[in-house]
Amino acid sequence: MKTKAYILGVIYLALLILGLVQIGINAPQGPPPYDYQMAEDEAKRVNVNVDNYTISRITGTKELWFRDMPDVSFVVAISFTDDPNKCCIKYPKDLVQITKNDDVLYGKATQDGEVLDTRKHRLIHTYTNFDKQLLAGWKTNGSDDRLIDMVEQEDTYTIFIYMTVMKDFCAIRTDSPGFCFYLIDAHLPSLYFTAYYNTFLRFYGETELGEFWTQWVNYKVDLGKAHIKNMRIDVDGETDYYDEECKVDTLLLTGKGNMPFFTRKSYKTIEVSEKKRGDITFGYDTEPMIKIAKPYGKKL
């Protein structure tokens, strides 16, 4: 009797284990691991060549305005010249449309550019020595700039555009996100810069600006080793300006927001125009800027 009960117990236990195993096999498995999902998504992306370049003359261009561009990342390298015959833009003509009206150069997406989706498309670009030098930290005219690298690994999300303009160039505006502007050896009387979110501006090499005005920029500006006579920043929220090595004679701050990175020694004079004290702050402790500045227009 005991033997029979023992055998029945063993059979019951075996059936229970088999049942649990079967339930486990048929149960929902949940989402795949993150790394596996990324690899699967990457495998589905279709290659798109973004190097079908054309070169257009842009003599007389003083302003640049990108709007309704493809929803990808952009690197725009801008060089400067005294020779109007060297003014040109090199861009992928099947994805970006460039037009010029008076002295303003406009860029927008073509029909093929409008459907670009980096979740579905892998952007294939052949990196030249110029590109590598640009992204690794530009060195020119004896300077030893070593700026932060944009990427150190293969980037399949970016379109490159190259420009050469005259030294009376004066404005950059973008209404599309995801831009990184590199200005190389900029010697300009004045420059105005305004941008949509997630846009970066960097100065490389020897930079001298008479006037530099940035408005509603809430991402990053790297001033490099620029020498700027008069600079104005219309602050709008938190804005990152890398200013450790630049020299600015006079800085005017307006608007409302915080500048977490701020190097006092880079500025000879700081003026603040704010509606109420403390609208403009600096540092991670958000100290009122007026503590180290003077009210705009007031003589000390």
Image: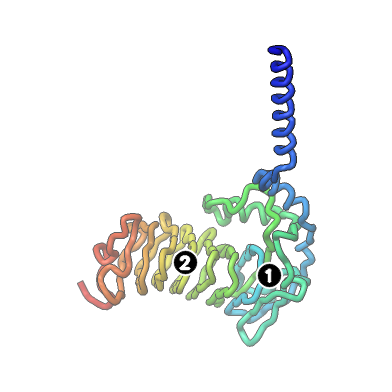
Residue located beneath label 2 in the image = 218
Label 1 crowding class (10 Å Cα cut-off): few <14, some 14-19, many 20+? many
Label 2 crowding class (10 Å Cα cut-off): few <14, some 14-19, many 20+? many
Can you tell which mark lies on residue 70? 1
Residue 255, given in percent of the width and then of the height, sits at 36, 74
Q: Nearer the viewer, residue 64 or 19?
A: 19
Residue 67, given in percent of the width and then of the height, sits at 62, 76
Q: Amino acid at mark 2?
A: Asn
Quarter of the rendering containing residue 123: bottom right
Looking at the rendered image, the quarter that the C terminus falls into is bottom left
Residue 30 left/right relative to 283: right
Q: Residue at x 38, y 58 (%)?
A: 260
Residue 24, given in percent of the width and then of the height, sits at 70, 37
273 to 223, vertically: above or below: below
For label 2, the SS is loop
Residue 202, given in percent of the width and then of the height, sits at 53, 61
| Sequence-first disc among 1 and 2 | 1
Q: Residue at x 72, y 69 (%)?
A: 91
CA gap between label 1 and label 2 equals: 21 Å
171 to 15, vertically: above or below: below
Q: Amino acid at mark 1?
A: Pro
Looking at the rendered image, the quarter that the N terminus falls into is top right
